[in-house]
Amino acid sequence: MRKPNQTHRTTQERRESANLRQEERNKRTPQQQIQHLDKVLGTGQGATKERARLAKMMEK
């Protein structure tokens, strides 16, 4: 039997957290999302496919 972990989050808690993050993401424009990625990951670092998708959306 596994010991209970004090920091273990339940599935419900993880789901709620994911929903909150998704709601915040949905409020951002593609330009704001790129700025957010730059802030979190560094300018031009990581999330290559996401950045390409956002750039394509901004062209339209």
Image: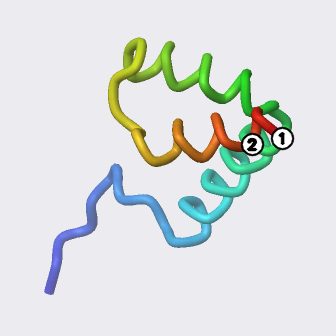
Question: Mark 1 sits on what residue?
Answer: 60
Quarter location, residue 48: top left
Three-letter amino acid code of the residue under disc 1: Lys
Residue 18: percent from left, percent from top: 61, 55
What residue do we see at 26% from left, 67% from top? 4
Compared with residue 23, is residue 51 higher up or lower down, i.e. above or below? above
Residue 13 location (% of width, % of height) = 58, 60
Name the kind of residue labelled 2 in the image: Met
- In the rendered structure, find residue 9 and report the number of the disc placed on it: none
User: Within 10 angstroms of label 1, few (less than 14), some, or many (20 or more) residues?
Assistant: few
Please name the residue shown 50% across and 13% down the image. 39
- Residue 12 or 31: which is nearer the viewer? 31
| Residue 57: mark in rendering | 2
The residue that appears at 85% across and 36% down in the rendered structure is 27
Above or below, comparing residue 44 to residue 5 in the picture: above
Locate the C terminus and report the quarter of the image it occupies.
top right
Dot 2 falls on a residue whose secondary structure is: helix
Q: Are marks 2 and 1 in contact (CB under 8 Å)?
A: yes
Position of 28 relative to 8 (above/below): above
Q: Mark 2 vs mark 1: give the one in front.
A: 1
